Amino acid sequence: MLAGMDSFQATIDADGRIEPRDAMPEGYRKTLIRQIAQHAHSEIIGMQPEGNWISRAPSLRRKAILMAKVQDEAGHGLYLYAAAETLGVDRADLLDLLHSGRQKYSSIFNYPTLTWADIGAIGWLVDGAAIVNQVPLCRCSYGPYARAMVRVCKEESFHQRQGFEILHTLCNGTEAQKAMAQDALDRWWWPSLMMFGPPDSASTHSEQSMAWGIKRHSNDELRQRFVDMTVPQADVLGLRVPDDGLAYDEETGHYRFSEPDYTELYEVVKGNGPCNQQRLAHRVKAHEDGAWVREAAAAYAAKRVAREGAA
Amino acid sequence: MNDLFVYTLRLGDDALIAAQRTAEWIAAAPQLEEDVALGNIGLDQLGQARSLLQYAGQVEGEGRSEDDLAYFRDERDFLNLQLCELPNDDFAHAMARLLYFAAYQQLLYEELLSCADETLSGVAGKAVKEVAYHVDHATQWVLRLGDGTEESHRRMQAGLDALWPYTAEMFESDDLVRRLPVAVDPSTLHDEWDRRVLAVVDESTCTRPEASYQHSGGRTGRHTEHLGYLLAELQHVARSHPEATW
């Protein structure tokens, strides 16, 4: 066993990949299960705020793109649950942990999608932030997670371009469409910045995850990267980022920006966001309403096996 | 009105309204694999709708786009089958509908493959492969639910029975389909549809549904009360900004 742990550390030190059958410290396994499950849960809860607009998408082309996008998220949920299962847990158990509130999902999905422009803002900002968070995970030390992230990131960058394009069309449209786009940016900007988690000074899981090669950059580094990437895009759209403290710093080559109100993040994480209860209740209802269907599928499969055995 | 326009609109409206109902399952399906599968099926239906509505607009020749036809027509102008607009009462109802509708579309598109209208035969060529998957997916679920647990059997039977009175409408013949050379007279599809669908019902251990009355009216724009709500939701944003492009 000691040899196993030595080889674990040697693999981490050499920036290699840990695979499911390799020895790994219990803390490493638990951290990954928590993180991958939370990521999978975020994908499937994230289907709701966007799914909310499928029936009302304002053109058939936009409806098709949105359906495909929400379907991709279900697909991401599937690969991520499969990646978590390589660590010796079951999807059904992880779903129970989500449904009982013992595992979390990204707090961003506890905000409501109030207008069509929110679908653009989610693609542009939320998927944009997700990409900044997730690209480094393609080099995560755990092989199955890293490989799942390669595919997820490719699709996310497609989603981000689609979101930008929705807003670009709105910003070049009628006055009402422009106002809708600005309103969406005003509401989604700060929650998007908080997707990178608490400031480094207050982050509880970061240090160990960095040492294990699960996390590659600090929350604040990623947040800065997101701001640097997004502000020039807002300029292209002709939208105003709702931060009076925002300014380009010639010396560092980075944007300076105001500190988000993290008390809001902590409240939403605790369950006090606008849609926490609604999102979870919707998920639990879909799961409970589907129980008889899953039971039927299992019963039918068992009958088939029994008949084949008898034949 | 132009016969080909009306005929294409019928097929396009069927696909559009079916897609709108199928999409309601996304983020609400019994398991994640089903969210993906029904997402695929809804996208196929929507793709068929777009091709058909675009073509209908061209045939009409008054400059209406797929979106003009989808978003700026009123309830009485929609020509879809009532079967397509009924609500998704439960998953068994949804699978009964998919079996009935996709089996009909499959036979229809198989015939349209050889019709003299190149656009319609082209749409059919793509769609025929898609609906074969829809039929297979629905068949697998009708078998699982019919021959699964007591509860699933009861629900599957209820779904098959509830939608059966909306199936005869698919096969109604009228002057238009008899007059228009490229149209398929749907009455010619009925016997084969019956054979295929009832074979699935029999294997599922459900009882063959019967009906003392068959609904009708969709092809002339007389619908159930459900369509108005469906369209209100579908059309709301586009109609609130009639001058906008998206």
Image (cartoon, grey):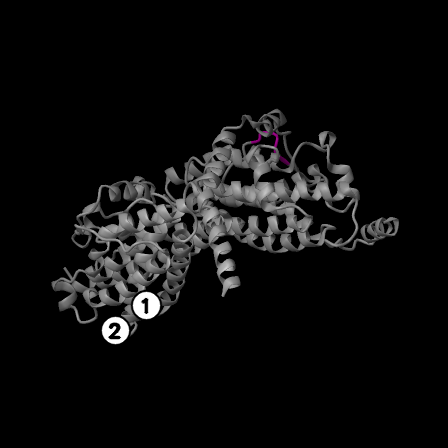
**Residue sitting at 62 percent across and 43 percent down?**
A37
Residue drawn where x is 30% and y is 70% of the image? B110
Helix, strand or loop at label 1? It is helix
Q: Name the residue at 24% across, 74% down.
A: B116
- Relative to A251, B84 lies left or right: left
User: Do discs 2 and 1 belong to a common subunit?
Assistant: yes
Q: Chain of mark 2?
A: B
Q: Residues within 10 Å of mark 1 (few under 14, many from 20)?
A: many
**Residue behind mark 1:** B124
Q: Chain of mark 1?
A: B
Q: How many marks?
A: 2
Q: Is residue B93 visible?
A: yes
Chain part drawn in magenta: A243-247
Query: Does B16 lie within the magenta span?
Result: no
Q: Does label 2 or label 1 sit earlier along the sequence?
A: 2
Q: Position of residue A91 (x, y in %)?
A: 59, 46
Counting from the top left corner in percent of width and height, residue A20 is at 72, 53
| Badge 1 amino acid | Ala
Labels 2 and 1 touching (C-beta < 8 A):
yes
Residue B115, numbered circle: 2
**Percent of width and height locating residue A185:** 50, 36
Name the secondary structure under disc 2: loop
Residue extending farthest front: A310
Dot 2 amino acid type: Cys
Above or below B82: residue A227: above
Magenta segment includes A245: yes
Per the picture, the main secondary structure of the magenta-coloured stretch is loop
